Image: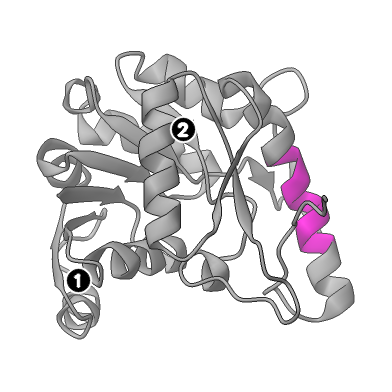
């Protein structure tokens, strides 16, 4: 499968590597496709990763991933060309974090709206699934927590088949499965968890922790 990833930061690269090492062809979309350091990084990853523009990634990808800073997410969709998202599953990894007052961050929207809902509204013909936004990039692929066996990724979205596809992606990345918390409006609560995750990271002095549900 060809996977188009919009965003070339730590999150985008981590997910790109995850897909590439599992046999998928990855088009990593960035604002600076001519960046030699990014090309060097891509060449060093096992598997096939090509670097291009946001539009290249959105046009060529059969499965799309939005992995960019929250405040730049909607502009990235515009730059990619919204027609390229039609009918495709779009994994939304963004968070509306507000660092304007420093650490820890707050949210620039929340409780009665979410960035995922705005993404879905911006590309209504896409099948948006919120996923991977509640974990740090180091745990997105091959997650591991000492003493914790079952690790499930929380997801939200309106399309049942799209969520099944994202569940298969999560399993291929090493998650035991997913926890479906509801429609795309449930992303409000997934996004709202992230400032707490950051605060806990500062307390624990590590950002490798994962929110998990303990159950019988």
Q: Say which of 31 and 215 sits in front.
A: 215
On residue 35, the disc is 1
Q: How many marks?
A: 2
Residue plotted at (39% across, 18% down): 122
List x then y, in percent, for residue 105: 76, 53
Q: CA distance from mark 2 to mark 1?
A: 30 Å
Q: In the picture shown, does residue 141 fall above or below 31? A: below
- Where residue 109 sits, quadrant-wise, is top right
Tell me if 140 is positioned left or right of 154 in this view: left
List x then y, in percent, for residue 50: 12, 64
Tell me if 102 is positioned left or right of 23 in this view: right
**Crowding at mark 2 (Cα within 10 Å: few <14, some 14-19, many 20+):** many
Q: Which residue does the numbered mark 2 point to in the structure image?
A: 129
Q: Say which of 173 and 78 sits in front.
A: 173
List x then y, in percent, for residue 127: 36, 24
Residue plotted at (41% across, 63% down): 173
Q: Say which of 203 and 215 sits in front.
A: 215
On residue 105, the disc is none
Mark 2 vs 1, N-terminal side:
1
Residue plotted at (34% across, 67% down): 18
Question: Can you see residue 74?
Answer: no
Q: In the picture shown, does residue 189 fall above or below 4? A: above
Q: Which residues are magenta?
A: 191-199
Secondary structure type for disc 2: strand
Question: Can you see residue 124?
Answer: yes
Q: In the picture shown, does residue 114 fall above or below 146? A: above
**Crowding at mark 1 (Cα within 10 Å: few <14, some 14-19, many 20+):** few
List x then y, in percent, for residue 134: 64, 52
Tell me if 65 is positioned left or right of 153 in this view: left
Q: Nearer the viewer, mark 2 or mark 1?
A: 2
Q: Is residue 48 magenta?
A: no
């Amino acid at each position: 499968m060809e996977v188009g990833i919009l965003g070339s930061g730590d999150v985008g690269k981590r997910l790109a590597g995850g897909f590439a090492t599992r046999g998928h062809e990855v088009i990593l979309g960035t604002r600076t496709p001519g960046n030699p350091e990014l090309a060097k990084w891509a060449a060093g990853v096992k598997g096939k990763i090509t670097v291009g523009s946001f539009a290249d990634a959105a046009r060529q990808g059969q499965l799309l991933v939005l992995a960019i800073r929250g405040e730049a997410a909607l502009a990235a969709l515009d730059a990619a060309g919204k027609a390229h998202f039609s009918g495709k599953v779009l994994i939304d990894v963004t968070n509306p974090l507000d660092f304007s007052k420093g650490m820890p961050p707050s949210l620039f929207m929340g409780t009665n709206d979410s960035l995922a809902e705005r993404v879905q509204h911006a590309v209504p013909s896409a099948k948006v699934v919120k996923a991977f936004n509640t974990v740090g990039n180091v745990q997105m692929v091959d997650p591991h927590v000492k003493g914790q066996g079952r690790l499930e990724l929380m997801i939200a979205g309106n399309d049942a088949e799209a969520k099944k596809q994202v569940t298969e992606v999560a399993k291929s990345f090493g998650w035991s499965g997913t926890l479906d918390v509801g429609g795309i409006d449930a992303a409000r609560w997934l996004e709202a968890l992230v400032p707490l995750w950051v605060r806990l990271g500062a307390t624990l002095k590590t950002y490798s922790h994962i929110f998990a549900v303990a159950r019988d």
